[in-house]
Image (cartoon, coloured by chain):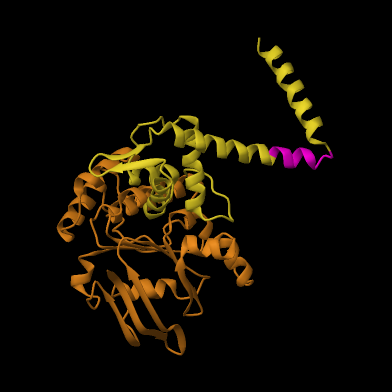
Chain colours: A yellow, B orange
Amino acid sequence: MGWNFNDNTPIYLQIINGLQREIASGAYPPGSRLASVRELALEAGVNPNTMQRALAELERQGLVNSQRTAGRFVTEDTAALSALRRSMSDEIIADFFRSMQSLGLSNEEILSLVQDWVLEHSKEEH
Amino acid sequence: MSMLECTALSKNYGSVEALRSIDLTLESGRIVGLVGPNGSGKTTLIKLAQHLLTPTSGMITIDGMIPGPQTKAIVSYLPDRDFLPQWMNLDELMTFYHDFFPDFNPAKAADMLDTLGVSGRQPLGKMSKGTREKVQLIFTMSREAKVYLLDEPIAGVDPATRDYILRTILSNYSENALVLISTHLITDVEPILDEVVFLQKGTIELHENADALRERTGKSIDGYFREVYRCWGN
């Protein structure tokens, strides 16, 4: 049912991550209205109070804002959105470099491998 | 506000102490998991709350009242076995619930039964076990109750039915109600819980916010209990 959660992190943190990804990717576009807490909770298969807690944290981070009667909206603050995208991609890059370094590769070698990969891939696509 | 309260609550069956002087306060608006191995006192506690048993000593109250007809009017109870007359068909059950419970919402029940695709003329006893459990849950959740007592709602059903049941609970409980779910299948209910109460040999080992427990221990609730209580079965 709903999203998959791993065992060792509080669920609300995993929900925050999931929603941040949806916002960063534009699956929830800037200025769009979020479903109600109850609907979101049902979709994720979690307790509404847990969803509420996650949304409150996103609000605190300035990624969503609530308008008392109309509901919750994704921020239209482009600076906040690009900061989010930046910090999420930094995390992914750090993970990637850690894995590559564990194979014994230097940063220079990794970079040139990445470039080769991109070139090869763009050939495949066209 | 506190919806279910136990003070030094004990229940003995002859010389067997099923519950030993437990103190417990559960608030409204929460989904609480009542977990513990077989024989730890889960069903006894629920039956005391539903006035199917009376305490040996101590006290239990629902919304400030001693269990009785007044509390049954605000408590929707799903026992751990078939509890509705098996000869009744769905139309008769609708009338039955409508007559018994002023908080029954027939439109809601009809809507869910419709989605489930069972016919009004079929008697309960002729349905498959899975369908029967779904039907009983639908009637239980179609009451706009203040307290839902669900005794082992997901025991012995297939994964798709289990999802259906959890989803039905999540989408239908009244906003400010207390939902108490007893189970030994912790993993399955973990994401929907606010709080968890762990019973062991008739005493409360732990009562904590579900996410706080995961944060404190770095483990799933299920994983934590498996580690702490090695004898954990099922």
Between residues A115 and A9, which one lies in front from this camera angle?
Answer: A115
Residue B197 visible in image:
no
Q: Residue at (51%, 79%) from the top-left corner?
A: B201
Number of numbered discs on residues: 0
Quadrant assignment for the C terminus of chain B: bottom right
Name of the residue lying farthest toward the right: A104
**Where in the figure is residue B46, as x and y percent of width and height?**
36, 71
Q: Which of the image's four quarters has the N terminus of chain B?
A: bottom left
Q: Is residue A100 magenta?
A: yes
Up the image or down, B228 lies above or below A49; here it is below
Of the pair A119 and B218, the residue shown nearer to us = A119
Relative to residue B20, is residue B197 depicted above or below? above
Choose between A84 and B191: the one closer to the eye.
A84
Percent across and percent down for residue B43 are 41, 71
Q: Quadrant of residue B116?
A: top left
Please name the residue shown 17% across and 60% down the image.
B100
Residue placed furthest toward the top: A126
Left or right placement of residue B127 versus residue B208 in this view: left
Residue at position x 39%, y 47% in the image: A55
For residue A7, above or below residue B60: above
Residue at horizontal 38%, vertical 75%?
B45
Magenta span dominant secondary structure: helix
Q: In this picture, which residue range is highlighted in magenta?
A: A96-104
Let me know if residue B181 is in the magenta part.
no
Q: Position of residue B154 (x, y in %)?
A: 45, 56
In this orientation, does residue B224 appear?
yes
Residue A7: x and y in percent read: 58, 54
